Structures are given as structure tokens and as C-alpha cells.
Image (spheres, rainbow, N blue to C red):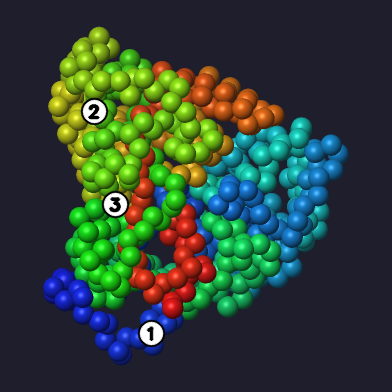
Amino acid sequence: MIRRRHLLAAAGAAAMPMPALAQPARARVVKCVPQANLTSLDPVWTTANITRNHGYMVYDTLYGMDERFQPQPQMAEGHVVEDGGKRVIITLRQGPRFHDGEPVRAADVVASLRRWMKRSPSGQKLEEFTDELSALDDRRVQFRLRQPFPFLLPALAQVSNGPAFIMPERIARTDPFQQVRETVGSGPFRFKRDEFNSGSLVVYERNPDYSPTPAGTPSLTAGPKQAFFDRVEWNIITDASTASAALQTGEVDWFEQPPPEIQQVIRRNRALSVEEIDPLPLTGIMRFNFLHEPFSNRRLRQAMLPAVSQDDFMQAIVGTDASLYNNRTGMFTPGTPMATEVGLEPLTGPRSLDRAKALMREAGYTNQPMRLIGPTDILAPAAMTQVGADLVRRLGFNADIVLTDWGTTVQRRTSREPLANGGWSMIFTSFSSFDFVDPSAHFPLRGNGANAWPGWPTIPALETLRDQWFLAPTLPEQQRIAAEMQRVAMDEVPYIPVGAYKSLTGIRRDLQDRVKGFAIFWNLKRA
């Protein structure tokens, strides 16, 4: 565990070379300051990116997704399609074993996918098309579909917002709305529960029995995954200056999300690099709770639109460099095929607090209480929450601002209780680029009520359009439907996009072959 007192004292000696005695250990260990504390170990139960990153350390998937968003075999050897597309049989590779020594069997895959299909948007859609999911034997998994579902493999390769991680059958039988109690996967690293100290330290060790796919080249979550470090440590350091000092003195190798002012310090150290963690931008959102006043009122949600300045929110995250953010962001990741400006006029027109206040009065707002919850210890959500807190105060909301750590915020946002019982009205968070590439895994763009992501909007038109998108025969037709989904969303306002930004990471230059996309540790090596 990093000694915080020592790190603070070391800040002034940031440019000093690392002591020689530390060199042998550095060859075998990589240390990172992650974006947030790890509070949930179940990547099916939560959409938190830190838990997704944990999942990829420990688990593997049938298919991976390459940087072109094309599915590639991972645990699967391959598949066959029969009966006009209504029967798909996936064959597992020989070799993968769970960390407890048991071989990965088709029965494990079936149980894992059944649990995943209850929570993941892509999985939920796949379940609608599935008549039967079964194990034909220990290596073959069979889907019998009601009709052909071309999105089956992309769903199994979904990068985020519910990756289809494979767990042992006994663990995968856990209620999908309850968190698993064991962390046993077949991935490149093993989770060291005996060293886990939430809020301080997370440790993984190399899985010596890992069986990487022999196919392809490393690209996002596809291709062979080689673990070159015996040990990976996530040191939870919430103070950015302390984390920066640790990076500069070599006590950690990677600071996942340094704030803009710290990035400038890191750039001055020739041993360090500041670079994009993902070539595509992440989208920030202002999410409303549809279940309770005041934002159960659609007109009040609409009233917020003239007041939102995407520049204000994005500059709080990345600074004033306009090349690092997009201020005309809609419901889909800028720079990807579904992105459009259709329906964005309420966000791209003149900004006016006075107009927003007038719309609030017309919507019937009469000082009803609202509660904004958010974190203080994770860069983008914390920055957006601060801007949002200032905004709701200036608009005249009777606002209760509750700031805690990110783990507590993630837990609290699942509450459906009214404000009097500890509920919430508004939250800010951000999503990885691949989460918003299209409607398939786009949690906040769902309108399926009680089964939706926290906020629980009921918007039947969005669900109808989403169903049509999955069956659209061409890219232009998919784009037309996505544009109509954005138009509906801007009217119903399940959330407001507050911009998209390039996430920059600070890392030692002697770490090479980093796979871009998020904090990925396989194939990472020290020169």
C-alpha cells in the first residue's frame, strides 16, 4: 500500500530517478491509481466502469470486440449457423480453466449468459429472440432463436454496459439482482481477495494457467491477452496531488484519470506521458429520476435544456482546450456512425437561464425539493456534479446537494425511494465511447420503466424504435432510426447530454504496448 505521508513529502523530488533497489520488483509488478474506488465486485450487477475494468482482469468472454467494433472469437473456437439463422451453435476452445482449476464447460456459459441477459441491454434483447439456450455437451452451446438475430455475436462481444463475462455455473446461478459473493473467472489475472481493502488497495496476480485465444492480434477486448506482470496493484489515492507525486517518483506507474492541472505537471517529467486512454470521446450526462417529483414532470425536464452549456461542463473536466471536447453532443458518441445533430436545437441554440426559469414556472415548479447526489473522488462525475450544483442553485431550485465518494453514489443511485426516504432527483456520470456507439448497450436511452437503468424512465416510443433498430437491414436505415430516437429523447428527456470529452491518462513511458480503450493491463509490458 502506498504510504501517503511519504508521497506528500516526495512531491518536491518528482524529477529524481527511482532508487536502484526498486528495479527488480518493478519488472514483475505494475501499480496504478484507478479512476475510482472498487466497491462492487460484480460486473453484471453494476454498470460502474471501475467494476467493468475489474471484470476484464478476472473474467473472459466468448467473443471480444476489436477497435473497429467487430466481434472476434475469444473463449469461443467458432460457431455455425443453421436453420436459416434460427439455430446458432458456439463451440468452446479447449484449454480455458477457471481460477479454481475447473475446466470451463458449456453449462457454465449457459448459466452465465442467462444471468447476463437479465441485466444487460444487449442481453435483454437477445433473450427476447431466444427460445432455448442450452448446453449440447461440455464444449457446445446452442441458441434456438424465434427468428434470425444478426446482433447475436456483437451482443456477446459487448465491451461495456454489461459484458457477457463467463463465471462458474455455481456462481452464475446467483440472482442477477443480487451481487455475487465469489470472484472466480478464467481471465488473465486472479483477484487477491485476501489483500483486498476497499478504499485502499486492490491486487491481482497473473493467472499462470490462462489460455489466451490463438487467433487475431490485440485490439480492444479481442485477440490474445498476455499477462506480462506477475502482480497488478490498484492503489486507491483520492488526492490528485498525492497520486501525481507517486507517479513522478515511480511509486506508481499509471495515474488513470489525472485532472487537467495535474496533467500539466506530468507533462514536464520526461519519464512520463499524457495520452488518450481511448481514441473516441466519453459522454457526460445529467440523469433525472422519473419516479418522483420534481423531475417526474416532463415539462420541468425540458425546462433545463436552455440552461445547459456543454462548454461549462466539459471545461470543468478537461480545461479550455477545445480540441479535447465536443460541445454539440447528442445521444450517440461523436465521430461514430449513429451520431447526429437531429433534434439538438434545444441544446445548440442560445443559452439562457432566464428562459429556463420561465419554463420552470410554466411547468408548475413551486419550490418542491430536489436532491442532487454525486461524488468527490472521481474526476469527470465530480467535476460535472460541481457545475450542476451551481446550475440548479442559480435556477432557483430548492436543492439538497449530497456529495460522497463514488462507491456510495453508485450504491445510492439504485434507490427508488422518494426524497423523504433518502432518494435522489438528479445525478451526473459519464460513459465510455463504446457504450453510446449505438442503441444496443445504451443504458440511459432505454425507456423500459422499472427495468431501466437508475432513473427508470417509461418511454414506449424509445423502446419501439430500439426494436426496429435491431432489425434494420442497412446502415442508412439504422441511422434514420437512431436519429428518430434522439428526437424522441430530446422531447422526453430521460437525460441531457452535457458534452463529450477525451479522457487523458498519465503513464510512465517505460510501459509499452498498452491496448487502447480503457485501463487494460493485458499485453502491457515494461521496456
* Quadrant that contains the C terminus: bottom left
Residue positioned 36% across, 31% down in the render: 328
Taking depth in this image into account, of 457 and 321 the one nearest to the observer is: 321
Which residue is pictured at 61% across the width and 76% down the height?
209
Tag 1: amino acid: Ala
Residue name at image x 49 percent, y 26 percent? 447
In whole angstroms, how far apart are the C-alphas of marks 2 and 1?
A: 51 Å
Give the quadrant of the N terminus: bottom left
Q: Position of residue 113 (x, y in %)?
A: 64, 49
Please determine whether, in this image, residue 58 is positioned above or below residue 392. below
Residue annotated with mark 1:
25
Q: Which mark is residue 407?
A: none
- Please name which of the two marks, 2 or 3, marks the residue nearer to the observer: 3
Residue 449 appears in view: no
Label 2 belongs to which residue? Answer: 370
Q: Give coordinates of residue 338: x percent, y percent.
A: 52, 33
Q: Between tags 2 and 1, which lies in front?
A: 1
The residue that mark 3 highlights is 378
Quote the CA–CA distance across marks 2 and 3: 23 Å
Q: Is residue 232 left or right of residue 146?
A: left
Q: Secondary structure at mark 2?
A: strand
Rate crowding at label 3 as few (under 14), some (14 to 19) or many (20 or more) other CA atoms within 10 Å: many
Mark 2 Cα-neighbour bin, 10 Å: few <14, some 14–19, many ≥20:
many
How many labels were placed on the picture?
3
The mark that comes first in sequence, 2 or 3, is 2
- Of mark 2 and mark 1, the one earlier in the sequence is 1
Residue at left offset 26%, top offset 20%? 350
Q: Amino acid at mark 2?
A: Met
Q: Is residue 19 above or below residue 468?
A: below
Residue type at tag 3: Ile
- SS type, badge 3: loop
Give the mark nearer the N terminus: 1 vs 3.
1
